Image: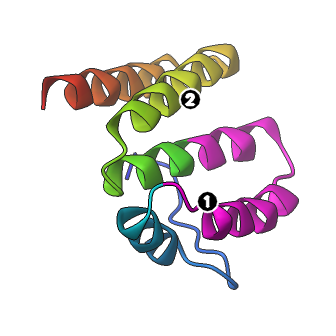
Amino acid sequence: MFKGIPNSESAEVSKGAVIMSLRQNSEDLSLLNKFLDVRESEVQSSKEALILNIEIAEIYRDAGLVDAAYEAFLDARDQAIQEGDNDLANELDAEAVKLMLE
């Protein structure tokens, strides 16, 4: 988890459950979509949207979906740059590169 990024868990569907579901069947996105529906409804600011994008990248990474995680980390990095958070952008870029080196 990145510094300053809260570990929010949706009351209805946890990140852990989504990760387990994707590990079992990466093509079944139903639980991920349910998680995203709930989390997106909670987003009130661009910073919270950035946090959600990082959560998505972490879900993909933890589920072993390397290509999707790579793209999601780069998307979050671009958003961090737009937010003016260059330190976070550098962390996200490093995480994306690390995925490609593993």
- Residue 85 in view (yes/no): no
43 inside magenta stretch: yes
Residue 11, x across and y down, in percent: 68, 84
Marks 1 and 2 in Cβ contact (< 8 Å):
no
Secondary structure beneath dot 2 equals helix
Report the residue that reaches farthest toward the left.
Answer: 102
Query: Which labelled disc corresponds to residue 80?
Result: none
The outermost residue toward the bottom is: 11
Residue at x-position 70% and y-position 84%: 12
Amino acid type at mark 1: Leu
Q: Which residue is mark 1?
A: 29
| Residue 59 figure quarter | bottom left
Q: Is residue 45 left or right of residue 102?
A: right
Q: CA distance from mark 1 to mark 2?
A: 20 Å
Q: What residue is pinned by disc 2?
A: 76
Q: The C terminus appears in which quarter of the rendering?
A: top left
Question: Which stretch appears magenta?
Answer: 27-53
Q: Earlier in the sequence, mark 1 or mark 2?
A: 1
In front here: 94 or 14? 14
Identity of the residue drawn at 52% across and 32% down: 72
Amino acid type of the residue that numbered disc 2 sits on in the rendered structure:
Ala
Near-viewer residue (12 or 81)? 12
In the shown orientation, is residue 7 left or right of residue 61?
right
